[in-house]
Amino acid sequence: MTARSIRGAVAVTLATVLSLTAAACSQPGGSDGSGSGSGADSAVVGIAYEPDSLSPLLGYGKDGNSKIFDGLLALDGDMKLRPALATALPEVSDDGLTYTYRLRSGVKFSDGKSFGAEDVVFTYRTILDEKTNNASRTELDAVKSVEASGDDTVVFTLKYPYAPFAQRTVLPIAPEHIAGKQDVNTGAFTTHPIGTGPYLLTKWSKGEKLSFRANPDYWGGAPKVKKFTMAIIKDDDVRATRLRSGELDGAILPPNLAKGFARGSGMRTYAATTYDYRTVTLPTHNKVAGDTAIRRALDVAVDRRAMVDSILNGEGRPAYGPVPTDSEWFTKGTERTHDLAAAKKILDEAGWKPGKDGIRTKDGVRAAFPLWYLTGDKLRQDHALAYASDAKKAGIAITTEAGTWEVIEPRMKQDAVLAGGGSPADPDFDQYTLLKSSLAGDGFNNMAWYDNKAVDQALEAGRRSGDKAARKVAYDTVQRELVKNPGYTFLTHIDHLYVVKDRFGALTTQVEPHDHGLASGPWWNVEDWTPKK
C-alpha cells in the first residue's frame, strides 16, 4: 500500500502527524488566509492531515485535484475523465501501447512562464527516475518512454497495454524551469510550489495551516473564493469544536460528531461514498499475526456489521478486502460472516489451545500481539478497540497502542497497525502496492509484508492485460486468495462526512479515495464555488 493511501495519506503523502496542542492552538485566520470573519470571498476548512511535500514529483496530488497544479486530465463530479492541460482525452493506438495528448495553448504557470510539452516530459521522467523519492513510481511501471512532439503534443509509449493508464495522467505537472534547476528531493520547490492550478500557495505553516489565494490568471477562470485555508487539526473533537465556534467554515468529521450539527444550524452535512477502508495489518514476520490459522480465525471472529452500526452510525459498509462490495470489481462469495464458533474451530484444529486465562498458546507461543493506531484518530481507535474485543472472545490477546507515525513506522514489520487505504480509480491502484511481495518494506507499501505467489502473479496479470474480462479473473483470484490467507483483516469501508456552512450553497462530493480532506470533500471544486454575500 502506498504511503499516501495507507496512512491517510496519502496520498498526497500524509505522513506528518500533528500534536494535539498544535492543533488546538492553531488559528486559521490571518493576513494570508482567512477565518469566516475576514470576508465573504474566503473559506477556511478543517482537515486532519498535511502532506510531507507539495511537490508532485514526490507524490503530491498524484490522484489529481491538487489546487496548485493541473494534470493532463482531471476527474469530474461523476469521476469521469475530462481534459485539463490536454485539450481532449488521449488518442490511443489500436494495440493500446501509444497514448498521444494534445496540449492546451496559452496556459501559464503562476510565475508567468508558459506551460508546454517539455514540462510534461520532465515531470514523468523525473518521477520515473530511481533517484527521485517517489513511493508511487511503480504506478507508472507501464511507461516505456515519454516524448515531446513539438511544443503542444506529448506521446507516451507503454511496455504493455495498461488499461487504466489514462487515469494515471491526472497527476500534476511541474515546471521544468524551476523544479528542474534544484534537488528534486530537498529543493525549495517541495514547500514553495509553482503550478498552473486555480490557487497559489501563500503560506504553509507546518502543523497549523495551508493558505492559498486565487490565481487571477487561471486558464479556467479566476475563482470567486479568493482566499482558501486548510487548517490542519488532527484531533476530531478539536476540529468539531472549532467548527461549532465559527473558526471554520467546514470540516471533515467522524459520524458521531457530524451528527451533532443539526439541520437549521446554518450548516449542511455532506456524505461522500468512498473506497476508504480500515484494515488491520497482520505482519508476516510476527510469530502470531503471521500464522495463517490466526489470520483466518480473526477474519471470521470480527463483527464487521457491528462496527458499521456502532462506530460508523451506519455510514459505511463491511469490508472484506480493498474492493467495496458494491463495486463491479468485487468478487461475490468472498464475504466473511461473523462466526465466533468457526474462529475457535480454526484455532483448535491448528493447535492453538486455550490457556487458563482463556488466551491460546501453541508451542510455547502465546496468541498475543500489539495493535497500533494513530493518536487522535477516533475512528481508528474505535476500530482497534472493537477488533481487540472480538479477538479476545476467540482467545487472541491484542493490546491496543496509540502513537504518531514516527513511532509506528519502525514497528510495522513486527507489529500490527490499524491502517487505511483505498482508491476508486482502478483495482490496480489499491491492490498492487498493498499486496505485492516485492514492495514489502518499501515505506508504507505492503505494510503487512504479505507474501503470496498466486497473488503476485494475479496482480501482474491484472496490470498487464488490456482485456477487462481477463483482468476480472485476475482480481477475483486476488480476492479469493485473501480468504485463504488474509494478511490483513479488512473491517469497514467508511463514508466520509463533512459539515459546511450554508453560505456556500448546495455543494457536491465525488466518490472519494482514502486520502480525504485535502483535495476531496465538498471543496473538491472550491474554485467553482459562489459564496453568498
Image (spheres, helix red, strand yellow):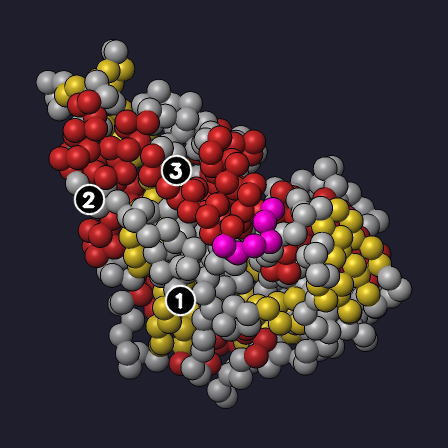
**Number of other residues with Cα within 10 Å of mark 2, as a class: few under 14, some 14 to 19, many 20 or more:** some
Residue 213: where, in percent of width, then height? 64, 71
- Three-letter code for the amino acid on which mark 3 is drawn: Glu
Residue type for callout 1: Ala
Relative height, residue 109 to residue 336 (above, below): below
Q: Residue at x 19, y 22 (%)?
A: 349
- Residue 142 falls inside the magenta stretch: no
Q: Residues within 10 Å of mark 3 (few under 14, many from 20)?
A: some
Q: Secondary structure at mark 1?
A: strand
Q: Residues within 10 Å of mark 1 (few under 14, many from 20)?
A: many
Which residue is label 3 attached to? 481
Q: Which residues are magenta?
A: 464-469
User: Who is closer to the viewer here, 416 or 89?
Assistant: 89
Label 1 – label 3 distance at C-alpha: 30 Å
Secondary structure at badge 2 equals loop
Q: Residue at x 64, y 56 (%)?
A: 165
Q: Earlier in the sequence, mark 1 or mark 3?
A: 1
Nearest to the observer: residue 92 or residue 43: 92
Q: In the figure, is residue 162 to the left or right of 370?
A: right
Apparent side of residue 413 relative to residue 489 in the rendered image (left or right): right
Q: Nearer the viewer, mark 2 or mark 1?
A: 2
Marker disc for residue 272: 1
Q: Is residue 468 magenta?
A: yes
SS for dot 3: helix
The residue under the point 17% across, 23% down is 348
Q: Which comes sooner in the sequence, label 2 or label 1?
A: 1
User: N-terminal of the two: label 2 or label 3?
Assistant: 2
Q: Is residue 416 in view from this perspective?
A: no
